[in-house]
Amino acid sequence: MGNFKIGELAAAAGVGRDTIRYYERMGLLREPARTAAGYRLYDATDLERVNFIRSARELGFTLEQARQLLALRASDTAHAQAVLDITLAKIADAEARLERLSDIRDMLRMLADECPGEVPVSDCPILAFLTARRKDQQHNKKHQAAQDERSPRAKGVLS
């Protein structure tokens, strides 16, 4: 297919026009040619590039990582190790997020198990936990800050 106007490119790639404009502003897409009337014109290379970015995003890569991957793909001298390094970092990030989500799930299950649904909300242990948790976190931060101020390291005694 030849040239696309922005709406046609967006529809073919399954994104909004604003996404195309954003990718242009971020330098992920080249500045397009324009018609005499000022309409942006894109080609199949642009469609392939948007599809590549979308594929990368669907796998959790950031736009910056997608930019790096695009640059590596276009390079005549880059090695696959650079792509692998980005991918391994993304895997480590995903594993950390999964662990955090698992912790959240476990906490929510514990709270749900402790909640007798038939009590008034004023006696709901989930709401009580959420209320107390923020207070505890704030108290712990203040307590830690006070301890840090009293430590010899904070006073410059130990360095």
Image: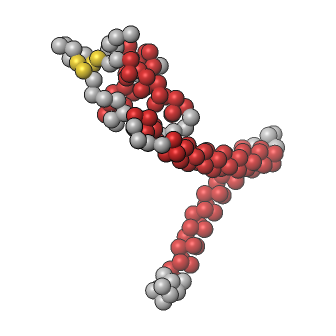
Q: Relative to 22, is 124 above or below? A: below
Confirm whether residue 21 shows in the render: yes
What residue is rendered at 51% in x and 41% in y? 80
Residue at the farthest left position? 36
User: In the image, residue 5 lies at what x, y percent?
Assistant: 32, 14
Report the front residue among 123 and 137.
137
What residue is rendered at 41% in x and 20% in y? 47
Instruction: Decide if residue 82 is on the left or right side of residue 125.
Output: left
User: In the image, residue 114 lies at what x, y percent?
Assistant: 81, 48
Q: Relative to 58, is 9 above or below? A: above
Instruction: Decide if residue 117 is on the left or right side of residue 26.
Output: right
What residue is rendered at 32% in x and 18% in y? 42
User: In the image, residue 121 lies at what x, y percent?
Assistant: 72, 44
Report the front residue among 23 and 71.
71
Dividing the picture into quarters, in which one does residue 138 lie? bottom right
Image quadrant in which the N terminus is located: top left
Q: Relative to 133, is 83 above or below? A: above
Residue at the farthest front position? 77
Residue at the farthest bottom position? 157
Q: Relative to 26, is 132 above or below? A: below
